[in-house]
Image (tube, rainbow, N blue to C red):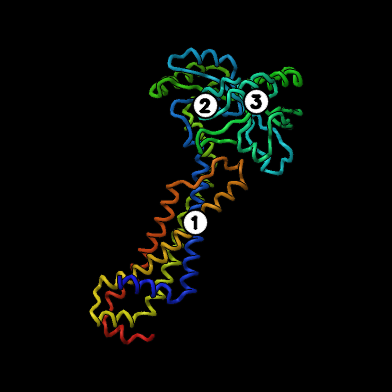
Amino acid sequence: MKVLKLIIKNTWRHKLRTLLTILGIAIAVMAFGMLRTIITAWYAGVEASAANRIITHHRVSIIFQLPLTYREQIQHIPGVAGVSFANWFSGIYKDVNDWRNFFPRIAIENDAYFDLFPEIIISQEDRAAFAKERNGCIVGEKIAREHGFKTGDIIPLEGDIYPGHWEFVVRGFYKGRDATVDETVMFFHWKYLDEQVRQSQPGREVNVGWYVMRIQNPNDIPRISGTIDEMYLNSRASTKTETEKEFQQSFVSMSSAILTSINVISFVIIGIILLVLANTIVMAVRERTREYAVLKTLGFSKNHLIQLIGGESMVIALAGGVLGLVFTFPVAGGFAKAFPTFFPVFNVEPITITMAFGAAVVAGIAAATFPASRILRMKIVDGLRTLE
């Protein structure tokens, strides 16, 4: 208990230096937590992927479409419990220069598409209303809150992949079963897209961007994937079939250089935490060299000295770590509100909290190691000769 009192008194002997060190560690921990949260948010779609769903798209690139005839053929493959398809629509909502107006717009086969995604929760009333209206759409609750969409509102879009002026009527909303589900997507009828394109651009076909399949037994995925790709190997539109996780991962890999840079920076921050804290502890120990020599003279053991130096380092490190984590949550919440569609799922994960707090603890131990070892090796006479 007496050692603890000495630790607390030593910690606050230079109040301004201690406060600035704690603040510096807190800012570094917060920055570390935010960068790690950005990385986990980038991988949110990958982590949320279902183990029993596979995706089939064009082997060359997803921008090339697949024939509609593939649907019936795929459906008859043993082990396929359900199949549907979708198309990326894109389009421009309001001001193209305002990224807040961007959210995914996807044309789906029909209302049954949602049966393949049990994590997307839609009321029966909304599903029925959506099924009845050709240009109806279902939107995620997150973008509904962001843009103030209500049932019956018209969402006007200027087509880019499919030119023209498009108007969709909001007929329902969906929410995620849990926090990992993207609530920023707008779904509408593929048939409406097909009809409008045929009228406005005679001769142009709207086919399939990708097929989604639910597999009865996930162990059959390699066999079914191989069967599908072999069926269309020599066709005009050869396919690539992969798990939903692999499909999502392919999009993340396009940003691998950015993610690697963020990852590296996040760990550089740990070094910054260590340097900030080490500087303070080294200065504090150097100023008290004569005091530690006196303590040795009075019979204080090596363990007592280690506790005094290490305890001061840990108090500062833990205070900065806790304060940094406290800052992280409101900052992350503000970031999520500022970028609602760019990062559809932006949550501070438990692993991020553990890593950030662990970094502060490691820094506290490492920062005390060198000055403590120096004091332990110091001769009492040399310590007493040190000027205050």
Classify mark 3: helix, strand or loop.
strand
Question: Given this view, does label 1 or label 2 mark the residue nearer the observer?
Answer: 1
Classify mark 1: helix, strand or loop.
helix
> What residue sits right under mark 2 in the picture?
117
Please determine whether, in this image, residue 287 is positioned above or below residue 244: below
Dot 1 or dot 2, earlier in sequence: 2
> What residue sits right under mark 3 in the picture?
188
| Amino acid at circle 2 | Phe
Q: Position of residue 138 (x, y in %)?
A: 63, 28
Q: Position of residue 305 (x, y in %)?
A: 29, 73
| Amino acid at circle 3 | Phe
Quarter holding residue 299: bottom left
Q: Quadrant of the N terminus?
A: bottom left
Q: Which of the pair 291/191 is nearer the observer? A: 291
Question: Given this view, does label 1 or label 3 mark the residue nearer the observer?
Answer: 1
Q: Residues within 10 Å of mark 3 (few under 14, many from 20)?
A: many
Marks 1 and 3: CB-CB under 8 Å?
no
Q: Position of residue 120 (x, y in %)?
A: 54, 29
Dot 1 or dot 3, earlier in sequence: 3
Q: Which of the pair 44/55 is nearer the observer? A: 44
Dot 2 or dot 3, earlier in sequence: 2
Q: Position of residue 364 (x, y in %)?
A: 38, 63
Please determine whether, in this image, residue 238 is positioned above or below residue 99: above
Report the residue at 42% width, 20% height from top: 216
> What residue sits right under mark 1 in the picture?
326
Would residue 225 appear left or right of 136 to someone viewing this image? Answer: left
Classify mark 2: helix, strand or loop.
loop
Report the residue at 74% width, 28% height from top: 167
Please determine whether, in this image, residue 187 is positioned above or below residue 13: above
Report the residue at 31% width, 79% height from top: 292
| Amino acid at circle 1 | Val
Inter-mark Cα distance, 1 to 2:
36 Å
